[in-house]
Image (cartoon, rainbow, N blue to C red):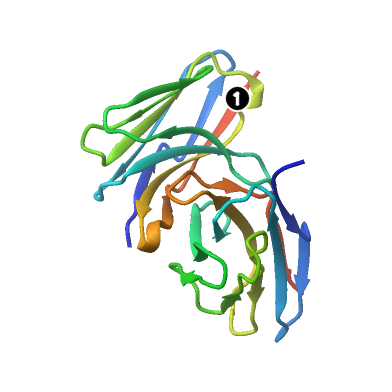
């Protein structure tokens, strides 16, 4: 099946630094999504991208839908302790009867040193 | 409050036992999904349902079963045929062709 390559797998940064992570695929997706997951909790949607080339911000977060529709990146500016967690990218396919199927990256674990 | 609820938070299964995980949503979403998450990995799709009384297999459906008798509910049964059931199970829902939103998850452990 389709796979997403998400990098880096982990990041160790100082508070206040900027963060960048990305996902690439050999498949074309209709939508790119970025989620954040805290330990023992479900993923929370951060940003949804619907058009190739789209650049969207949500506070200190910025994400872009690649022109080729095969990649996306997420940037976090001026990191703070509550940014700690695992970030997942997900590509969305359109299946039968309009059902949406998500393919997930392996996740980027973000650790912040105060 | 509106949202997606999963219960229980933790579930223990004995060898050869079937267990059922609950997922309820009051968001009036048409589609519901079940994912499995293993440590250090992304989410993998088990089953999904677009409408009541209809569901389709995902990528790893073997050893699992679902039902969709009500729009609000999409329970997942982990059968004895699933030989490696220990994982974190996540339910999601969304409007047709819209983004998916996740519940808090159920951690299944084998005794």
Taking the spot 46% from the left edge, 72% from the top edge, the residue there is: B57
Taking the spot 59% from the left edge, 79% from the top edge, the residue there is: B82
In the picture, measured across the screen, residue B10 lies left or right of residue A104, that is right
Q: Tag 1, which secondary structure?
A: strand
Q: Quadrant of the N terminus of chain B?
A: top right
Taking the spot 63% from the left edge, 61% from the top edge, the residue there is: B71
Q: Quadrant of the C terminus of chain B?
A: bottom right
Density class for disc 1 (Cα within 10 Å; few <14, some 14-19, many ≥20) is some
Question: Residue B7 appears in which quarter of the rendering?
Answer: bottom right
Quick one: B18 or B40, which is closer to the camera? Answer: B18
Q: Is residue A65 above or below residue B44?
A: above
The location of residue A13, given as percent across then percent down, is 53, 23
Quick one: B42 or B62, which is closer to the camera? Answer: B62
Q: Which residue is mark 1?
A: A112
Read off the chain for label 1.
A
Question: Residue B16 appears in which quarter of the rendering?
Answer: bottom right
């Amino acid at each position: 099946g389709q796979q997403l390559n998400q990098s880096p797998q982990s990041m160790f940064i100082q508070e206040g630094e900027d963060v960048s992570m990305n996902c690439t695929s050999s498949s074309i997706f209709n939508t790119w999504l970025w989620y954040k997951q805290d330990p023992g909790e479900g993923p929370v949607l951060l940003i949804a991208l619907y058009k190739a080339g789209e650049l969207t911000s949500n506070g200190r977060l910025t994400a872009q839908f690649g022109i080729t529709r095969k990649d996306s990146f997420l940037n976090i500016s001026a990191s703070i302790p509550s940014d700690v967690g695992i970030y997942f990218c997900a590509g969305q396919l359109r299946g039968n009867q309009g059902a949406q199927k998500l393919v997930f990256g392996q996740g980027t674990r973000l650790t912040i040193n105060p | 409050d509106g949202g997606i609820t999963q219960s229980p938070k933790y579930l223990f299964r004995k060898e050869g036992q079937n267990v059922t995980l609950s997922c309820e949503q009051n968001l009036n979403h048409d589609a519901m999904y079940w994912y499995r998450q293993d440590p250090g990995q992304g989410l993998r799709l088990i089953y999904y349902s677009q409408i009541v009384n209809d569901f389709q297999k995902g990528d790893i459906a073997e050893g699992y079963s679902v039902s969709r008798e009500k729009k609000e509910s999409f329970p997942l049964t982990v059968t004895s045929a699933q030989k490696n059931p220990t994982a974190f199970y996540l339910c999601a829902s969304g409007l047709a062709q819209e983004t998916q939103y996740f519940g808090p998850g159920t951690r299944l452990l084998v005794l």
